[in-house]
Image (spheres, grey):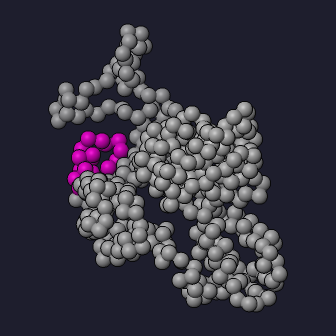
């Protein structure tokens, strides 16, 4: 465990997973994070540390039959005081509902301790009954300090690299192209040091040139997943339907999960279009439901329609900014008391204490509006929502100006 790099919030001293491991008792959980951050490695370390039988299945190749065989084997080994085996399922988000259903009984009865690994949001991809039996731990992309540790480990511990004379002059390009992915970092090192040379001076120029020359080897699947989804999102946000459709085509041709793309469109509709065109969220939701039912090849048409609609729609991130500002203030100010007029008063005692007193019912007033205080006293007048310059929000600003003088719209 001490040799594991990254994820200090989970495995650092006093962190939740380390405490669980040190206690010798672990419950089923799911590790959610981007590729190359140590999900599989962490599962193997846990199994070794606890001296548990360790079964591994890949959701890409395993079926219900394979799951049942592991469960049967685990049942036969569960006698006397033997600890239950760990079943590690890589890419658990790719398991179908029936495959996930086949795990339920074994996880609930403690026949196996399940550790799942996924790059997708478990809320969308893991069935609710299984998710309720597992904790979800979020792994983060590796930071520069983590990548530096991995680089040093590779240079000092790798059997082949120890034989070479290697001088690291610059690391910016190395870490930039790694993108917080340990596997990608090691692949880049493999490319750089693949020539039959005994002496290397690593610079940003060397790294960039090597990757340009050997990009097909470096990107074995033909798709740089996170780079391309980033280009797609930024093209839609930047209102360029042509670029957006191009990056959409790259993802579809590369075998990307259509539900992943549709989920990104849902987020884009709320984050980047928002109140400038609230219908965008409805269309994005319809897109997600449609591609889930239909699948490829026809789903490409639905994704294209939604992508072009969102790219050509007016943009606003006012809702996104408002909730982030409000969350930041909540973290800074804590649990400020709810004003008495806004409190619920279901009992006689609460009414006697003034709960709900002086509350003004908006519908009893002309125009269904009356000015009153809805924020805690300490933050009265604090503005979170700032309408932006699009037709819908210009209209909203005019209405707010009429009603709310204290917010200075």
Percent x, y of residue 275: 29, 54
On screen, residue 3 versus residue 321, left or right, reads right
Residue 111 in sight here:
yes
The image shows residue 283, relative to residue 323, as above or below, that is below
Percent x, y of residue 209: 60, 88
Does the stretch in magenta take in 284?
A: no
Please give the name of the residue rendered at 47% of the width and 50% of the height, measured from the top-left corner: 64
On screen, residue 403 versus residue 183, left or right, reads left
Nearest the viewer among 292 and 242 is 292
Percent x, y of residue 240: 32, 74
Q: Residue furthest left?
A: 366
The image shows residue 162, relative to residue 55, as above or below, that is below
Residue 8 in sight here:
no
Please give the name of the residue rendered at 64% of the width and 67% of the height, measured from the top-left corner: 182
- Count of all numbered marks drawn on residues in the image: 0
Percent x, y of residue 212: 56, 86
Nearest the viewer among 393 and 109 is 109
Q: Which residues are magenta?
A: 392-409
Q: Quadrant of residue 186?
A: bottom right
Please give the name of the residue rendered at 25% of the width and 26% of the height, measured from the top-left corner: 361
On screen, residue 266 versus residue 14, left or right, reads left
The image shows residue 329, relative to residue 144, as above or below, that is above
Nearest the viewer among 80 and 276 is 80
Does the stretch in magenta take in 396?
A: yes
């Amino acid at each position: 465990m001490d040799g594991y790099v990254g994820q200090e919030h989970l495995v650092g001293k006093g962190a939740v997973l380390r405490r669980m491991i040190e206690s010798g008792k672990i419950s089923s959980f799911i590790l959610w994070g981007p590729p190359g951050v140590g999900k599989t490695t962490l599962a193997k370390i846990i199994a070794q540390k606890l001296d548990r039988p360790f079964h591994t299945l890949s959701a890409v190749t395993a079926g219900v039959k394979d799951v049942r065989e592991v469960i049967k084997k685990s049942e036969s080994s569960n006698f006397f005081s033997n600890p239950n085996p760990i079943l590690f399922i890589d890419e658990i988000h790719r398991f179908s509902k029936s495959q996930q259903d086949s795990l339920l009984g074994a996880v609930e009865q403690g026949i196996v301790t399940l550790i799942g690994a996924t790059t997708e949001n478990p809320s969308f991809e893991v069935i609710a009954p299984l998710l309720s039996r597992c904790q979800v731990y979020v792994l983060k992309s590796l930071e520069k300090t983590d990548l530096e540790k991995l680089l040093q480990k590779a240079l000092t511990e790798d059997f082949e690299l120890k034989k070479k004379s290697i001088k690291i002059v610059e690391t910016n390009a190395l870490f930039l192209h790694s993108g917080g992915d340990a596997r990608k970092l090691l692949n880049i090192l493999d490319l750089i040091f693949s020539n039959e040379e005994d002496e290397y001076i690593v610079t940003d120029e060397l790294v960039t040139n090597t990757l340009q020359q050997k990009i097909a080897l470096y990107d074995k699947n033909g798709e740089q997943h996170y780079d391309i989804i980033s280009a797609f999102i930024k093209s839609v946000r930047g209102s360029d339907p042509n670029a957006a459709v191009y990056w959409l085509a790259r993802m579809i041709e590369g075998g990307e999960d259509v539900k992943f793309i549709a989920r990104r469109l849902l987020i884009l509709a709320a984050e980047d279009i928002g109140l400038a065109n609230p219908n965008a969220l409805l269309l994005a939701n319809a897109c997600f439901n449609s591609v889930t039912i239909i699948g490829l090849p026809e789903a490409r048409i639905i994704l294209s329609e939604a992508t072009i609609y969102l790219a050509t729609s007016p943009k606003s991130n006012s809702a996104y900014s408002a909730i982030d500002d409000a969350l930041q203030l909540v973290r800074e100010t804590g649990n400020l008391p709810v004003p008495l007029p806004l409190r619920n008063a279901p009992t006689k005692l609460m009414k006697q204490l003034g709960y709900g007193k002086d509350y003004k019912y908006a519908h009893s007033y002309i125009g269904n509006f009356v000015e009153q205080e809805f924020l805690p006293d300490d933050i009265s007048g604090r503005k979170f929502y700032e309408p932006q310059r699009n037709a819908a929000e210009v209209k909203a600003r005019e209405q707010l100006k009429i009603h709310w003088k204290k917010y200075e719209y």
